[in-house]
Amino acid sequence: MSWLPTEDPRCDGREEHSPIDLLIVPRARDIGGFEVRRALPSPRRKLVGPFIFFDQMGPAEFITGEGIDVRPHPHIGLSTVTYLFEGSILHRDSLGSVQPIEPGAVNWMTAGKGIAHSERTGPEARATGQRLFGIQAWVALPKAVEETDPAFFHHPADTLPVVAGEGKTVRVITGSAFGATSPVATASDCVYADIRLAAGTRLPVDPEFEERALYIVAGAVEIAGTEHPAGELLVLHPGDPITVTALADSHVMLFGGEPMDGPRYIWWNFVSSSQARIEDAKADWQAGRFTAVPGETEFIPLPER
């Protein structure tokens, strides 16, 4: 089965007044007992603002002694954004960062000119077993800072603003939304928010940015008379204000920003405005020229294709 999402041609912007340009249904892939659904990139949509990669991780149940073990691997030209709903992951990187992440917090790792990292279930969670559920996103860097020095920042859940009331609870992960502004620093202006809606709640979404999308994690919502269930990514029409109505208790992620300053190439874990730069990164990883992750002895080899 293909690892690319499918797209619904009924929602591709051809309907004159449709508030949804494109409907994407991520395909599920089992990666050793752990299910992942990739919404971006898709065949006809690589980016929504600077967001070039959007994966739903889980939900998955790990019994005692089990967990995830993503061995050290490289990145360039992007920031990885790990955000969990349930469970925990232990992050290690080639800067020497060692940081567990738990629900509602953010691990923001900027690869820039090159970084390697691992993501594993920590020893405490592995000893007790856990349920793991969350989103892994990548944010492409503007050309001016694609080759910046790598960096890592952790933002605990209690540092991110929460807007609550009238049936909604919104945690603003990056940017500004619904009257609150996140302290997370980003290389480009963008928005990313975790939205929980009680059944019957109506939530207006303003067209602050040209490119916006909603990912329905759980429940079901109605937009302009059309019902959308969990597991759909809705790319919204530029400039259109919309209202999301929760048909059941629902969980939605909002993200987007202004269009990127040109196209981006993506190959494995590398993102760049230059295909030649990606070829250099491939050669560097294969030759062992990336800085190693302290405390790790394994690594993921360069794929053949």
Image: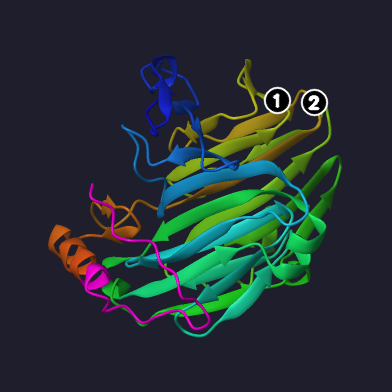
- Residue 73, position as x, y percentages in the image: 40, 65
Q: Quadrant of residue 251?
A: top right
Q: Residue at x 42, y 30 (%)?
A: 5
Q: In the rendered view, does 241 fall on the left or right side of 130?
A: left
Element under disc 1: strand
Q: Residue at x 51, y 59 (%)?
A: 70
Q: Would you place residue 223 above or below residue 94 in this image?
A: above
Q: For the N terminus, which image quadrant?
A: top left
Q: In the rendered view, does 18 fall on the left or right side of 132?
A: left
Label 1, label 2: how many angstroms apart (C-alpha)? 6 Å
Q: In the rendered view, does 199 fall on the left or right side of 273?
A: right
Q: Which residue is mark 2?
A: 248
- Residue 55, position as x, y percentages in the image: 52, 45
* Residue 299 inside the magenta-drawn segment: yes
Residue type at mark 2 is Ala
Among the two numbered marks 1 and 2 on one chain, the one whose residue lies closer to the N terminus = 1
Q: Nearer the viewer, residue 114 or 147?
A: 114
Q: Residue at x 83, y 35 (%)?
A: 198
Q: Would you place residue 118 above or below residue 238 in this image?
A: below
Residue type at mark 1 is Ala
Q: Nearer the viewer, residue 26 or 165?
A: 26
Q: Which mark is residue 220?
A: 1
- Residue 13, position as x, y percentages in the image: 38, 23
Q: Are marks 1 and 2 in contact (CB under 8 Å)?
A: yes
Q: Quadrant of residue 67?
A: bottom right
Q: Residue at x 68, y 41 (%)?
A: 59
Q: Nearer the viewer, residue 91 or 194?
A: 91
Q: Quadrant of residue 292?
A: bottom left
- Residue 197, position as x, y percentages in the image: 78, 38
Where does the magenta region start and end?
284-305
